[in-house]
Amino acid sequence: MDNIKNTDPEIHSLIQQEELRQATKIRLIASENYVSRAVLEATGSVLTNKYSEGYAGKRYYEGQQIIDQIEQLAIDRAKDLFGAEHVNVQCYSGSPANIAAYLAFLKPGDTILGLALPHGGHLTHGSPVSISGKYFNAQSYELDPGTGRLNYDTIRQRAREVKPKILIAGHSAYPRILDFKKFRDIADETGALLMVDMAHFAGLVAGQVHPSPIPYADIVTTTTHKSLRGPRGAMILCKKQHGAAIDKAVFPGVQGGPHDNTTAAVAIALKEASSDSFKDYTAQVVKNSAVLAEKLAANGFSLITGGTDNHLMLVDLTNKNISGKQAAKALDRAGIVLNYNAVPFDKRKPFDPSGIRLGTLAVTSRGFKEPEMIKIGEFITRIVSAPTNDEMIAKTAQEVTALCGSFPAPGLEHLV
Ligand SMILES: *Cc1c(COP(=O)(O)O)cnc(C)c1O
């Protein structure tokens, strides 16, 4: 980063500090990961200099000889990896991708039905504070109060009641796999389009450790930076018949020029995600998640649904007499970074809810396996039971740094 150092020492110093933070902390935020050096290089390449509104072969500016090939490669790789008929790789991020999907099929006031935000849905699935809840008639379904799981009978009943134009499946905080066939049947029965937002688990689908929504959904949206381990970005995958509507909704509907540097980085991430080593990575992500969940449960933590099938878990801390926020703050001081999170039917307020969310995407990318998960479970148990014990927090922070020192993080190998 010599050029940044010369031009802007302040930003240089801050990036260096963030590098060190990412290298030396145990990062359990379920949506975060470590991308490869190759992805970082593409993101920082001269492709950022280009404007390319439109699509390959139909651009509004000249000089697209190279960009067209880059975008086509990204599209072809996504089609291959996921078995999709049509792919748009221009979406700036997950939220605009979802808005584009709505724009393609809905008019203002039309009905959408998605998982409620406090139950693990995303803001863009119809939350009242989001454009998705303000411009559309946003209805929601909730988790089963008994099991903490999706209840497909309840979802069917809600769909019959509200007759959504789009039924949304997908989540940001649900620890179990989804039954896409059941969602498809409900959509068919109620005349809805089925949209699956696989932002969190797309990488697990690519690695074949989570069922694929592609055969069932009309539209699939995903971010590229969570389990897929690419740059900040998003894609929409859909049936051929919806391709033109989706492309028109992304550009010119919601966006202007695509971020070509990101598109190249997405292409690289897709190539990486089609390798055998990525399959191994995703299998380890799920194993690590299961081991951490088991360890926490053994230590008296209450896990929503009792465990996990994917990369994440939700822990209700009510029986530990600590709020999610207090726990998250104390853990952060000990070098374990995660987020406080509402649990289903939470009695506390969203800004200080009862739970924490943990994910294993990032720690698995740095090579952590089962033994390290057990250690993390022990660290968490220790901190949550004594969140104001400064001495113990400081000691744990040292242990965390030492553990991270033995597992250089991708892109940050130069720091250990
Ligand atoms: C993260 C996420 C998004 C939004 O992605 P951004 O890139 O943060 O806009 C959309 N849907 C789901 C389910 C997500 O988890």
Image: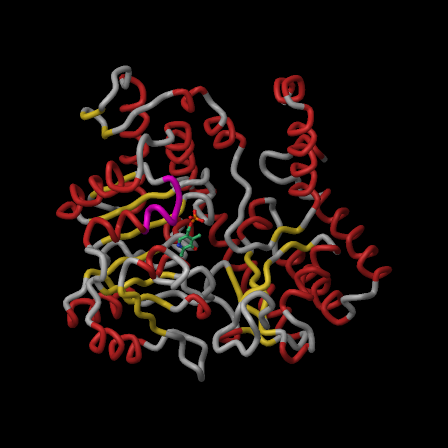
Seen from the viewer's position, the closer of residues 193 and 111 is 111
Spot the residue most to the right. 391
Is 281 within the magenta?
A: no
Is 153 located above or below residue 248 in the figure? Answer: below
Colour scheme shown: secondary structure
Tell me if 222 is positioned left or right of 13 in this view.
Answer: left
Magenta highlight: main SS? helix
Tell me if 121 is positioned left or right of 325 in this view.
Answer: left
Is 310 located above or below residue 59 in the figure? Answer: below
Q: Quadrant of the N terminus?
A: top right
Q: Quadrant of the C terminus?
A: top right
Q: Magenta segment, which residues?
A: 92-98
Residue at 41%, 20% in the rendered image: 49
For residue 249, what is the image quadrant?
A: top left
| Residue 403, percent from left and from top | 73, 49
Tell me if 101 is positioned left or right of 337 in this view.
Answer: left
Residue at 38%, 74% in the rendered image: 142
Tell me if 18 is positioned left or right of 391 in this view.
Answer: left
Spot the residue most to the bottom. 146
| Residue 336, percent from left and from top | 68, 55
Seen from the viewer's position, the closer of residues 239 and 103 is 103
For residue 321, what is the image quadrant?
A: bottom right
The total number of labels drawn is: 0
Seen from the viewer's position, the closer of residues 123 and 285 is 123
Seen from the viewer's position, the closer of residues 101 and 238 is 101
Is 94 within the magenta?
A: yes
| Residue 288, percent from left and from top | 56, 58
Residue at 78%, 69% in the rendered image: 386
Is 11 located above or below residue 337 in the figure? Answer: above
| Residue 283, percent from left and from top | 48, 54
